[in-house]
Image (spheres, rainbow, N blue to C red):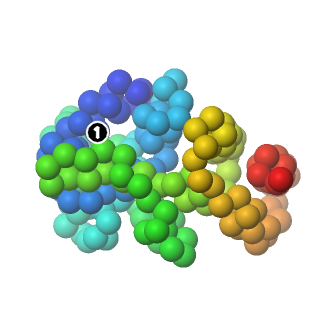
Amino acid sequence: MLDRDQLEELLEAMVERLKGDWLLVGGALVALWLEPRRVTADIDIVGLEGTQGERLRLMEFAESQGLPIEAVNSAVDFLVQRIPGWRDEIEIFRERGGTRIFRPTPTLFLLLKVRRLSEQDLADCLKMLDRVGDEGLVLDAERVLRALEELDTSDDPDLDLRRSLLQEKLAP
């Protein structure tokens, strides 16, 4: 498991070594931005060009840092690209030289979490909602509510309950 300090070191190394534009999402982003006590097993990061070359560079980077290649997850691009207009929902998180690492806006962050919405995902979403309230960040709550309403009822009653809890937090 990677903690905030380890993730901070890895992100600094990424900014130094991985040129181009990248999108950081998932637990690593939560640990670095929302909840310093959060740990994660991997770093969900996507190259914005969407090329195999970017994926290869991520694997090489992981290996150079002594990490298993599974510790850098670029498969999250599948989830990101399913969200219409996702490129309009990213903001610079870190930037240096020829490298920019973006983070999702609160809207995109929640949209990426609502389908699976594990217990950890719900906790992450609630942290995001706290951040939105504390800092006055922009959140398109209506869009997230629509996304929740469009989901099929789950075979898992706990998932349906977590979705309902998130809906209650988002509703005006």
Residue 127 location (% of width, % of height): 63, 37
Element on which disc 1 rests: helix
Image vertical order of residue 2 relative to residue 62, above or below: above
Question: Looking at the rendering, which quadrant does residue 128 occupy?
Answer: top right
Residue at image position (32%, 31%) is 8
Question: Looking at the rendering, which quadrant does residue 15 occupy?
Answer: top left
Is 5 positioned to the left or the right of 168 in the image?
Answer: left
Residue 143 location (% of width, % of height): 69, 66
Is 158 positioned to the left or the right of 3 in the image?
Answer: right
According to the picture, the residue beneath numbered tag 1 turns out to be 11
- Amino acid type at circle 1 is Leu
Residue 1 location (% of width, % of height): 43, 30
Total labels drawn: 1
Residue 117 location (% of width, % of height): 68, 51
Between 128 and 25, the residue placed more toward the observer is: 128
Q: Is residue 59 visible?
A: no
Image vertical order of residue 115 relative to residue 38, above or below: below
Is 138 positioned to the left or the right of 44 in the image?
Answer: right
Residue at image position (82%, 60%) is 155
Between 18 and 69, the residue placed more toward the observer is: 18
Between 100 and 147, the residue placed more toward the observer is: 100
Image vertical order of residue 91 relative to residue 65, above or below: below
Q: Is residue 169 visible?
A: yes
Residue at image position (41%, 27%) is 4
Is 82 positioned to the left or the right of 171 in the image?
Answer: left
